[in-house]
């Protein structure tokens, strides 16, 4: 039986200042800007096979749960790199088969990082 959908095409995240957010996601996290349409208030950031689309909003109300996780093959290196870049990060948690931690972007959006053996 085939599935109706093949993958998640993009993930949307609201931000209040596109220029600051684009700079943060590209310079701090090291992702590549795919495109930015200033007039429409959208920018796509390349992150593996699923792009992150930043959407301009006048106000952002961060949730208490990360809307998605970034996967890393070296969670300690990812954690230390973010700490060294001055990013606010929470402690690494060991859940048995999965390790994870959270950090925040300039709009205080909660973002997750996870690691598990593939």
Image (tube, rainbow, N blue to C red):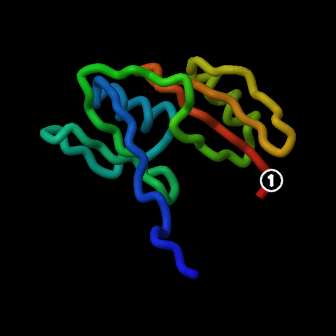
Residue at 35% over, 32% down = 14
Residue 6: percent from left, percent from top: 49, 69
Q: Which residue is mark 1?
A: 117
Query: Which residue is the extreme one toward the right?
Result: 96
Q: Which of 49 and 8 lies nearest the eye of the viewer?
A: 8
Residue 47: percent from left, percent from top: 49, 50
Q: Is residue 40 above or below residue 8?
A: above
Q: Which of 28 and 114 lies nearest the eye of the viewer?
A: 114
Left-right relation of 58 to 39: right
Q: What is the quadrant of the N terminus in the image?
A: bottom right
Q: Is residue 80 above or below residue 73?
A: above
Left-right relation of 66 to 84: left
Query: Which residue is the extreme one toward the front?
Result: 1
Q: What is the quadrant of the C terminus in the image?
A: bottom right
Query: Which residue is the extreme one toward the left?
Result: 39
Residue at 29% over, 37% down = 55
Query: Which residue is the extreme one toward the bottom?
Result: 1
Q: Which of 60 and 51 lies nearest the eye of the viewer?
A: 60
Please rate how many residues cluster around mark 1, counting C-alpha atoms within 10 Å: few if below 14, some from 14 to 19, many from 20.
few
Residue 97: percent from left, percent from top: 84, 45
Q: Is residue 32 above or below residue 99?
A: below
Residue 93: percent from left, percent from top: 78, 29
Helix, strand, or loop for circle 1?
A: loop
Left-right relation of 110 to 106: right
- Count of numbered marks: 1
Q: Which quadrant of the structure image shows residue 12?
A: top left
């Amino acid at each position: 039986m085939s599935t109706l959908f093949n993958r998640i095409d993009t993930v949307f995240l609201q931000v209040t200042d596109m220029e600051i957010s684009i700079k943060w996601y590209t310079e701090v996290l090291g992702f590549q800007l795919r495109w930015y349409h200033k007039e429409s208030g959208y920018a796509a950031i390349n992150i593996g096979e699923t792009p992150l689309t930043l959407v301009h909003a006048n106000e952002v109300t961060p949730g208490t749960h990360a809307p998605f996780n970034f996967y890393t093959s070296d969670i300690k290196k990812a954690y230390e790199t973010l700490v060294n870049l001055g990013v606010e990060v929470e402690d690494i948690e060991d859940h048995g088969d999965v390790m994870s931690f959270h950090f925040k972007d300039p709009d205080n959006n909660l973002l997750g990082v996870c690691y598990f053996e593939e």
